[in-house]
Each structure stands twice: as structure tokens, then as C-alpha cells.
Image (tube, rainbow, N blue to C red):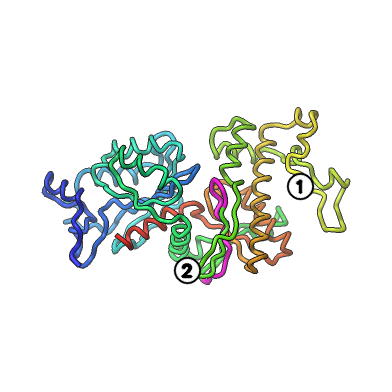
Amino acid sequence: MAPRSCKVCDRLRMASGSIPNGCSEAMSDSIDYPCMPWFGMDIGGTLTKLVYFEPKDITPDEENQEVEVLKNIRKYLTKNSAYGKTGHRDIHLQMDDVSIGGRTGSVHFIRFPTSEMGGFLALAKKQGMATLITTVCATGGGAFKFEPTFATEVNMKLAKFDELDSLLKGMKQIVQLNNPGEVYYWANPTQPEACTKELYDFSDPYPFIIVNIGSGVSVLAVYGPSNYKRISGTSLGGGTFLGLCSLLTGCSSFEEAIELAAQGDNTKVDKLVRDIYGGDYQRFGLPGDLVASSFGNMCSRERRQSVTKPDLARATLVTITNNIGSIARMCAVNEKINRVVFVGNFLRVNQISAKLLAFAMDYWSKGTLKALFLEHEGYFGAVGCLLAFNEYS
């Protein structure tokens, strides 16, 4: 099959006499790939995740043909770790020697608040992306919401892919490339002094439960590479945590909310079993330090006057995490699956919740359920739609 002609490359060829590196016309006649640069976007309700594939197998001839705009984009994205005031590249997550679409290179992971989409598009236009790219692959609810904005602001089309399909495709790819370094668990989660982070071999994964914690939460039961179903979810997710924290403490970012929570004591806000029973509820094995009523102590004016913003942030985090853990455990029990994988940007810089979830899975299942976590947390959807774009282009 003859390769399709790229309109952007046609314009650039007329202007400069050269074809951008990565264009289908610069490749073998038997291969048909979208124009570089290659991006994958997961536009969530709170955070947008962007992956950029940087080819490292560029030949001298290709480098000579590469247009200046593409060189500048590559240099800008890979030489910086911050973009504007709110965009960040997670350098520690960079993956090298990755093969996509017949090319070998590095995958870079970038994030910015979805509320700053206007700033992102302005930056894309400034760096010349709008003159070089006609289509960007995207997933998440924002791929639908912002499709008209991309078209009018930067003349780009969004190739949209299902977010749950993309999540699983991206997760499978990264786990295969990064196994056993990608998946880990918290050993001895019920013993804080002995709790340690350990690698987990996920080369034989099926079946498993996946709990995707973004603005809200989706729970999937996964039985095979393309065999899964959504079995539950909750509207109380990472967006809830940040929204409530912003109301209660005045914080302005997820990082600030987590920092506050790390300094706080939720037992000053929550009513515990011992506050009701004076100790453990022994008949049903409920320890005295278990939360019986989230924010239950805030019914008292005296207690309200004594709590701090860090206490409120910690209580909010514990409330949201405990709710997610309860739903995840019930789903695992119902599906008779003993491995529960937690992903999503709610877990970024959030060891408090990861350890709480590990504790909940282990304690309430009497050690029969294992909570697993992944290093790339919330980027799987962006990777998955990038892979799908290259497969179907």
C-alpha cells in the first residue's frame, strides 16, 4: 500500500524542499506512520498527562532533512523540566530504548492542570507545533470537551481513543518494558516500622482488579489483554480530595494539599472506635484506632476550634482513601480476584494513601488480597492512545 501524503509535510516541502523526519514519505514505501512529533494526551478532569516520543535512531540524512521547527520542538521539550508556570516533566519516569512505530527512542512524561489548557495551547502555538502537527491522539473526557478548542486555536484535530482501552494498553506496554521495576507493593503494611517497598513480578498478571484513581474512580476487572469489564466506581476521588482541601485549608495545588496532610493528625478530626467504645470493639475485631466516623469530632465546637489546617487535610485524605479501599476490597471479593492494582495521579507524591490502601487490603482480607502499585501511576492512558494512534494511522 502506498503511504498517504501528509498535508503539513506537503506545505513544509514546498517551503523548504525537505520532508520532516518521521513523515510516512521519508520512510519505507511499505510503512505508513503519522508525522512526527508523536504525542499522546490523556485529558482528565483535573490533570492532563502528555507523553512525547523522542526518536534516538535519527540518521545523518534524516537530521539534515529535519525542519528547524521540529528540531526546536524536540530541543524545547527534552531540555526543560518545566513549561510555563504549571507544566512539569517527570524526568525520573523517562523511558529509554523504547520501540514505537518502527522507531527507537525515549518516552518523556509531562503533566499540567487541565484548567491551564489555554496556556498549553498558547505555548504549543508559540513553539510552532501548530504549523507541524495536524492530528494529536487523545483520550479522557477532555478529548471530547476540548476538541473544538484545539481546532479553532491551533488547527489540530484530536484522534480520540477510549480511555479505559487506552489505560490497559498503556499499562500492558509499560509493565512489559519495565518489568520487574514497574510494579511494587508495600510489605508488612500493618506494621509501620517494618513496612518496606518491594518489587513485584507482574509478568503473569491475569486476572486482576484495577482501580484507576483520577478526579473520580473507576474499578475494572481484567481477565485478559482485551477482556475486561467496568464493575464499579465512585465520584469521590482525587478531585474530591483537592476540592475539599481547597475549601477547608485554602491550599492551591495537589502538592500543597499532600504536604499539609503529611503534617496533620486525622484523629483530631475523625471519631474513632475508642471514642465510642472506650477501646476496641472486640466482638467484631474492630481496633480502637479505627475510624468509626470520618469528621465525626467536628460536631463539637471545642474540637473545631482546636484543629489545624494540616489536621483537616489529613482527615480529608484518609476519608477519601478509606472509601476507595472499601470499594476496591468489595469488588475483589465479589470477583474472586486477589490482586488489586491501584493507578492514577492521586497516588503521585502520595505515599500516605498508598500505605493506607495496602494496609486496608491486607488487614481486612486477613492477608488474602495484595495491593499493587505502579511507578508511572497516571500516564498509562496517554501511552495507550499513542500506541493505538501509531497502530491505526
Contact check, label 1 and label 2, Cβ < 8 Å:
no
**Relative to the observer, which residue lies in front, 24 or 377?**
24
The C terminus: image quadrant: bottom left
Task: Report if residue 286 lies within the magenta region.
Answer: no
Q: Secondary structure at mark 1?
A: strand
Mark 1 or mark 2, whichever is nearer to me: 2
* Residue that numbered label 1 is attached to: 291
The residue at 45%/40% (across/down) is 114
Where does residue 352 sit, x and y in percent of width and height?
64, 48
Q: Amino acid at mark 2?
A: Pro
User: In the rendered view, does 83 fall on the left or right side of 37?
Assistant: right
As measured in the structure, the alpha-carbon distance from the residue carrying label 1 to the one carrying label 2 is 38 Å
* Residue that numbered label 2 is attached to: 225
The N terminus: image quadrant: bottom left
Q: Quadrant of residue 275?
A: top right
Where does residue 38 sit, x and y in percent of width and height?
31, 52
Task: Report if residue 206 lies within the magenta region.
Answer: yes
